[in-house]
Image (tube, rainbow, N blue to C red):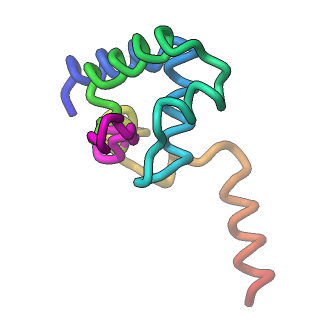
Amino acid sequence: MELKNATTALAALGQPTRLSIFRLLVEAGPDGRMPGEIAEALALPGATLSFHLKELSAAGLIQGEPRGRHICYRADFEAMNGLVEFLTRNCCGGDPTRCQPPGAAAVTARKGRARA
């Protein structure tokens, strides 16, 4: 993922309703959800949902698949993983041992000794 795509994706997710829709679709997994299910789960009017689905789709974060007269929406996991990878690329100067929060190494070490 490049800077322009990441900026577009983050802007789309920077709106609370779109973030809620995206999280719901991530939770649904590859089966996705129908618009009626999304609207009901998040108490959204149809027009509002359509607007936000269009924005998430334009940002490349979700995909719609026709199912008869309806469209099933699902998170684009490749795009999601690409965004996470973009955000964490070269984290801590490329040294993954530095990416742990303070004290995490000690907790990991204690867990390892407890298993031994």
Residue 5, image x and y in percent?
23, 23
Please say if 29 is above or below 80. below
Residue at 50% x, 9% y is 48
Identify which residue, 66 or 80, lies in the foreground: 66
Residue at 55% x, 35% y is 23
Residue 26, image x and y in percent?
49, 43
Q: Is residue 31 left or right of residue 44?
A: left
Question: Extreme bottom residue here?
Answer: 116
Among the 4 quarters of the image, the one containing residue 57: top left
Please say if 40 is above or below 54. below
Among the 4 quarters of the image, the one containing residue 92: top left
Please say if 74 is above or below 50. below
Question: Extreme front residue here?
Answer: 69
Residue 16, image x and y in percent?
58, 15
Residue segment shown in magenta: 66-80
Identify which residue, 72 or 83, lies in the foreground: 72
Residue 96, image x and y in percent?
44, 52
Residue at 38% x, 40% y is 72
Asked if residue 110 lies in the magenta stretch, the reply is: no
Identify which residue, 42 or 103, lies in the foreground: 42
